[in-house]
Amino acid sequence: MQWEIVIGLEVHTQLSTSSKIFSGASTAFGAEPNTQACAVDLALPGVLPVLNRGAVERAIRFGLAVGAHIAPRSVFSRKNYFYPDLPKGYQISQFDLPIVGQGSLTIQVPTATAGQTYKKVVRLTRAHLEEDAGKSLHEDFHGMTGIDLNRAGTPLLEIVSEPDMRSAAEAVAYAKMLHTLVRWIGICDGNMQEGSFRCDANVSVRRPGAELGTRREIKNLNSFRFLQQAIEYEAQWQIDTLENGGTIQQATVLFNSDIGETRAMRSKEDAHDYRYFPDPDLLPLAIDNEWIEQVRGTLPELPLSKQARYVADLGLSVYDADTLTSSREMADFFEATLNEVPKGAKLCANWLMGDVSASLNREDRDITQCPISPGQLGGMLKRIADGTISNAAAKDVFKILWSDGGNPDTIIETKGLKQMSDVGAMEAMVDEIIAANPAQVAEYRSGKEKVFGFFVGLAMKVSKGKANPAQMNEILKRKLAG
Amino acid sequence: MSLSINDVYKVARLARLGMTEQEAQTAHTQLLTIFGLIAEMQAVDTNGIAPMSHAQDISQRLREDVVTEHNQRELFQAAAPQIKEGLYLVPQVIE
């Protein structure tokens, strides 16, 4: 019998503000321990939190980008638990009245067939603002734990999905789309190594059509690969457990990436009794329509809208459109290139996803660090489009542009890469070839059409690869016909 | 709603408060009085009235996103029982 895997994700995105959510301390990454932890972050007596407008504005941007309702009034609550990296003994979060309500995200999920995807809409339950905790360092302190509170009070937007995903691939596609979106709208730098984008996955299994099974929550997955591996391992473990007659207990588990396994955390029975209540230090947050509309006015065109436009207006495949909108920088690069060759959308797409991406990957760079500008690339593609150079010659131009820079037209000129399109010259060349190879000509004329390849090869050799292939073929066919 | 003495112990444990039996009994009696008051208030018909989350019916003011705090680590850590390499040291906790 079949099992169905059910996955919901909670993603913590660190908002890209300069200062913390409730204090004026810096959020810059990598500072010396505790040099960015002020009196509010340390929970010294008598301090009061004051909410950062920039954090609220980023939450609004997100809500608008996923078509969600922005709460005109939302409330901050205290989530109570004890841990040394949480100096107040509670985390300020949002509970029953979050800032962002229900929304949705459309994702493209890759299938087993390369280049093929299917579309799926994942519903978002909510997104709420909260503060991050500090960091505990368990090594090197002779049985003591070191606490760095620089991260304490960093603004987070926790984005909660409905349990709408049915495979690890769907969960990864959702996480990637969310990762693209938060960077696209400029609310999070998306740096997963630095912990700016962390996923928790709720996983359960059930028989298709049955009620939801008991879920286990995998905490703190900070790469798409780990997300995929952890979900696959966890789902299989649950299926094996149930098939062997066992039951699933609700639990929080950690993924050990070294051995690729999930393991339940030891937890006390009361560990999740957070006793939420409205924080008396913070009044309700009011957001009026004027502010929402002002933020809406600053939103860029969103990836989904661009994808649809690339497919409908430019004739690109869904896969191409999806890849070109993987980041705003990539889409901007594509559009700037296309500006040079307005009718060459497919040509631009092929080169960006082919030679440009491959070269960037090889040098471990991203599109913003591309040594070739969209103007240079577009200038070169224009010369392919108008027949000045062949695709093969373009690869040479591309290599020179990549390593030395310069103007594509100048490179084509000085390196003599122009295609031969002079019909008279090509005809003369073909006449010579025919005169010099009477045996092969006779063979061809007696019906052995395979010999045509021999003539094409010869013509390319004689023209030093510069002959326009289509024109040359046409001339060869005509002349060989006699 | 009634509150048992076990509820008192549970809340005390969650709040990391050690209580003697005598203290727990006192807290129990006091809390029951408070719960009695709450029961009285809950008898009032509040249909159609939006619950407030704060005693004051106003909304909060926001700060601009500007760094206004500078590093005062030395001053703050002067009050810490144990520090090392800029970190606060605490008894080890591993879950």
Image (cartoon, rainbow, N blue to C red):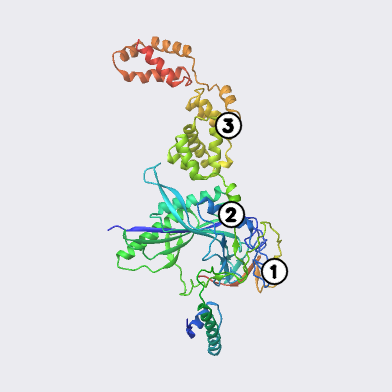
Q: Secondary structure at mark 3?
A: helix
Residue pushed farthest bottom?
A: B22
The location of residue A127, given as percent across then percent down, is 52, 59
- Labels 3 and 1 share a subunit: no
The lab-note entry on whether marks 3 and 2 share a chain reads yes
Q: Which residue is mark 1?
A: B76
Q: Position of residue B79 (x, y in %)?
A: 69, 73
Asked if labels 2 and 3 touch by Cβ distance under 8 angstroms, the answer is: no
Residue B43 visible in the shown view: yes
Question: Is residue A257 in sight in this rendering?
Answer: no
Q: What residue is rendered at 37% in x and 19% in y?
A: A454
Whole-number angstrom distance, CA of label 3 to CA of label 1: 55 Å
Q: Are marks 1 and 2 on the same chain?
A: no
Q: Indicate the position of residue A89 as horizontal and vertical percent values.
A: 58, 72
Tag nearer the camera, 1 or 2 = 2
The kind of residue on which mark 1 rests is: Phe
How dense is the environment of label 2, judged by Cα within 10 Å: few (below 14), some, or many (20 and up)?
few
Q: Residue A289 shows which numbered tag?
A: 2
Q: Say which quadrant the C terminus of chain A sits in.
A: top left
Q: Is residue A417 above or below residue A212?
A: above
Vertical position of residue A58 compared to residue B36: above or below: above
Q: CA distance from mark 3 to mark 2?
A: 44 Å
* Chain of the residue under the numbered disc 3 shown in the image: A
Q: Callout 3: 10 Å neighbours few (<14), some, many (20+)?
A: many
Q: Is residue B18 above or below residue A241?
A: below
Residue nearer the viewer, A258 or A13? A13
Q: Separation of disc 1 and disc 2 at Cα?
A: 42 Å
Q: Is residue A90 left or right of residue A446?
A: right
Residue found farthest to the left: A1
Q: Which residue is mark 3?
A: A376
Which one is nearer the viewer's eye here, A326 or B52?
B52
- The foreground one among A154 and B56 is B56
